[in-house]
Each structure stands twice: as C-alpha cells, then as structure tokens.
Image: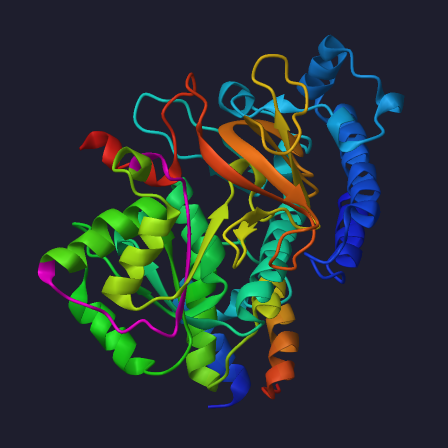
C-alpha cells in the first residue's frame, strides 16, 4: 500500500456518512482495511514485524476485528515505531505526560496527517456542519508557546482550531477566566452559534469553578461545548457527566455539551458523545472491550480494557491499540440517538496504569 | 493593491520571508514559521484581507502558495 493508495481509499470512505452504516456493512469493510494496514506495517516497520512474529500472528487468519493484532499503547512510549522512512516524517506528536513519565512518540507522514484532519473534519461536520464557528478555547494562550514540541493539549487545540474562527482563549496564563477577553468575544458574536472547546478538567476546575467563585454567569446559550481528555481528576471530586453538564448549564447557559474520547496515538478518528450520552465509534474506528485477565473480547455490559481500532495510522503501526482505559460496550447499531455503530462508555483507568490524561498535566503538580 | 500583491503580502508578513521565495516551491512546512500554528494565523490573515470565510476542507488542502491561490478562487478571489 502506498500513501496514494491510502489517501484514495480514505477519500472513498469520506463520502459515506460516518454514523450511518450498520455492522453488516461496516465491519467487513473495516476489518479489510485494518488487515491491509497490518500487512503494510509488517512490511515497513521491522520492530512491528518482530512483534507479530513473537505473538504468532498468522496473516492469513485475520478475518474479523478481534483477529487484528493489537499493540499495548504504552509500546509507543518505549519504542520508536514508524512505518515510513525518517525523511518522510513531517511531524512528531507526543502524548501528555508529567515530568519523569515516558511520553508516546507518534511519527506522522504527510498522508497520515492529512487523513487525520480530513476525518476529524468529517466527524465535526456531523456536530456543527461545514461552517467554521467563532471558537472559544478553554485554555491559556501559553499552551502553544513551544511550537517545536506541543503538549497533547496543544496538539488537540490546534487540530480542533480548524473548525473555528476568531480563536479566543478563555483563560489567562494563570488559568483564571479571562473575563475581558470572553466578554469581548461574546459581544462580537452575540446571538451567533459558537464552538467552545477544551479539556474536561480545565473546563470544570478553571472555567466553571472560576466563574462560580466570581459569581459570574456567561451568556453562552448558543454554544456547543466539545470537551475531552478524561474524567480521572473529576471522578476524584465525584463529578460525573451529569454534574458536569448541570454545572456548565447553570454557569454558562450551555445546553449542548459533547464529550469526546480520543488519544494522540489515534488522532482524528475520535469517538463522539451522542445526544443520548453515549460515545460512538464512527465508520473510521471501532472499539473492542477485552478482559484484563486473558484479553478475550467481552460482550456488552461487561467492564474491560478498551481496544481502539482506527483506519488512519499509516505512518506508524497504531491501527489497533489496547488502551489502559476501562470501558463498557453498551450496544451496537441500536442507540436511541439513531447513530449506527458501537456505543460505549469509559469508566476509568486500569488500576496499574501509570498516571496519565491530557488535562491531568497541571493537576498532578497541585 | 492587486489581489496578487495582497496575497503575497500576507505570506511575507506571516512567515517573515522575502517575496522572491514565494512560488510553486513554497509549501507547508518549507520554513519553520509555516507550521500548524503559522498555518492558522495565515488563514486568518487571508480571511481578513479578502473578507472571506474559508471552509475547513480548504484549510486542510491549503498545502502551498500556489495551491492557495487556486483555492481562493472558490471564494471569488481571482488572480
């Protein structure tokens, strides 16, 4: 498979509504694409080929999603895994990680980076349409200061800033609500639809609690809030999705709050929360829940490790990853919201997992 | 100022380059300033200059100085 083949196939997929295919149509298509990626990476990433040999992967046997060999996500912290020549790497992404912890290093060629942006754009169009909206970023402008090496937070902000205009930061560099900046932004876009983006923990800890402490309420009734990065820090404060939504509505008027689940190791093919409150796999991705004991695939309703599948990783062997997140599959193709595909919930981190999470970076120092 | 001159001026100001490097070979990431942050700044400057709003797909496809001129045609900016 060449980069051109990859982009040509992706262009065909982008023509299909991303939450419309039922399992009978989606799964064989996805399994085929993932099996081709396995062969591509086996051929072009010697370390990956050795891993497959050790695991005893039989290339001809891969028939379903569960047969695609998966890598533990932490391998990207321990090894530099790339399936393109070094001169083809045009961007290196690193995961969040507090000082002393290893970070993932993800090597992108132009094709993979373009694929990520196109798929993210396709998924975002389901939420906000094709128009770019005035965008309020719940972070401090300093997050993008080091342009040579972004944090995962910075990389996500940049990726999502494609969908915004008049990008405005809602926090100052002390992570306090920047009320003059926010109010000027709201005055410029009174009555217009607005996109608010940020990390779950920062939104709660620094925007919501900051506003509440100041006794200020924002008029963001026309906004859609998209947030991700994990719930770990908020779970410690007993704040779940329902409390989060209720708090934000009270302090900012925002009614449309959409959580997403994603990771730097599979940028682009994120999982979006539907109006029924469930995370959904799109055409470009899927999840399997595996038993932490023997890695067998668990049925709906049982908690296990989340494996994420994505058609995007071409320049590095990250198309099937066993995360350190725990989750529960809720169903497939029958969510009341009408979106097809698997839907699930993330329940926490595996107990042995090292401390990590995009928006935990600051919290861990507090 | 002609559209060509305005377009060129945005690149000169956003990326700190001389006019004579701007051509077919001036592509995304060819200079350190044209990284993903610089890209969004350049798009915002073009939108201000020409009074347009570009679609996400066109921002993704905006891969070079020359490609950008072609894409701006969709918004009625001709060279």
Please indicate whether residue B38 sits to the left or right of residue B56 in the image: left
* Residue sitting nearer the eye, A96 or A146: A96
Residue closer to the observer: A146 or A358:
A358
- A50 or A92: nearer the eye? A50
For image coordinates 81% across by 35% down, the residue present is A36
Is residue A157 magenta-colored? no
Question: If the image is split into quadrants, where does the N terminus of chain A sit?
Answer: top right
Measured from the top left, where is residue A33 in percent x and y? Answer: 79, 40
- Determine which quarter of the picture holds residue A69: top right
Percent across and percent down for residue A264 are 50, 39
Measuring from the top left, give residue A300's x and y in whole percent.
64, 34
Quarter of the C terminus of chain A within the rendering: top left
Q: How is the image coloured?
A: rainbow
Front-lying residue, A241 or A153: A241
Left or right of A215 on screen, residue A261: right
Left of A167 or right of it: where is A35?
A: right
Residue A28 seen in render: yes
Q: Reply above or below: A357 against A285.
A: above
Q: How many marks?
A: 0
Q: Residue furthest top?
A: A54
Residue A176 can be seen in this image: no
Residue lying farthest to the left in this orientation: A214
Question: In this picture, is A63 found above or below A194?
Answer: above
Q: Is residue A87 above or below residue A303?
A: below
Q: Which residues are magenta?
A: A214-233
Q: Position of residue A91 (x, y in %)?
A: 53, 42
The residue under the point 15% across, 66% down is A216
What's the residue at 64%, 82% (across, down)? B74
Q: Residue furthest right?
A: A60
State the residue at coordinates (36%, 22%).
A101
Magenta stretch: residue A222 in it?
Answer: yes
State which quadrant residue A135 falls in: bottom left
């Amino acid at each position: 498979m060449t980069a051109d083949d990859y982009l040509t196939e992706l262009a065909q997929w982008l023509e299909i509504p991303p939450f419309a295919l039922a399992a009978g149509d989606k799964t064989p298509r996805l399994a085929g694409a993932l099996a081709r990626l396995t062969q591509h990476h086996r051929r072009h990433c010697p370390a990956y080929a050795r891993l497959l040999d050790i695991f005893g992967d039989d290339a001809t046997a891969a028939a379903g999603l569960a047969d695609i060999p998966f890598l533990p996500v932490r391998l990207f912290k321990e090894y530099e895994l790339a399936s393109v020549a070094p001169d083809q790497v045009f961007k290196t992404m690193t995961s969040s990680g507090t000082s002393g912890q290893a970070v993932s290093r993800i090597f992108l060629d132009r094709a993979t980076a373009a694929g990520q942006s196109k798929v993210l754009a396709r998924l975002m169009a389901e939420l906000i349409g094709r128009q770019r909206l005035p965008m309020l970023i719940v972070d401090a402008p300093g997050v993008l200061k080091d342009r040579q090496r972004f944090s995962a937070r910075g990389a996500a902000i940049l990726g999502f800033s494609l969908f915004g205009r008049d990008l405005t930061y809602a926090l100052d560099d002390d992570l306090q609500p920047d009320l003059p900046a926010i109010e000027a932004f709201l005055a410029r876009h009174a009555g217009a639809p607005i996109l608010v983006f940020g990390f779950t923990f920062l939104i709660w800890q620094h925007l919501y609690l900051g506003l509440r402490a100041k006794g200020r309420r924002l008029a963001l009734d026309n906004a859609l809030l998209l947030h991700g990065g994990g719930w770990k820090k908020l779970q410690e404060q007993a704040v779940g999705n329902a409390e989060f939504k209720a708090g934000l509505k009270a302090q900012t008027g925002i009614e449309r709050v959409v959580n997403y689940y994603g990771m730097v190791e599979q940028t682009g093919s994120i999982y979006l929360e539907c109006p029924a409150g469930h995370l959904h796999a799109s055409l470009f991705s899927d999840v399997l829940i595996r038993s932490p004991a023997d890695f067998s695939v668990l049925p709906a309703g049982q908690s296990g490790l989340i494996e994420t599948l994505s058609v995007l990783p071409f320049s590095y062997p990250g198309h099937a990853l066993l995360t350190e997140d725990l989750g529960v599959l809720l169903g497939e193709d029958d969510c009341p919201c009408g979106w097809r595909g698997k839907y699930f919930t993330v329940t926490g981190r595996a107990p042995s997992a090292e401390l990590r999470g995009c928006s935990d970076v600051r919290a861990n120092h507090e | 100022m002609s559209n060509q001159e305005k377009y060129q001026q945005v690149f000169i100001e956003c990326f700190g380059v001389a006019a004579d490097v701007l051509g077919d070979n001036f592509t995304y990431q060819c200079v350190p300033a044209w990284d993903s942050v610089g890209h969004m700044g350049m798009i915002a400057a073009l939108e201000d200059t020409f009074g347009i709003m570009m679609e996400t797909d066109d921002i993704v496809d905006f891969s070079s100085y020359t490609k950008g001129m072609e894409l701006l045609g969709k918004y009625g900016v001709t060279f």
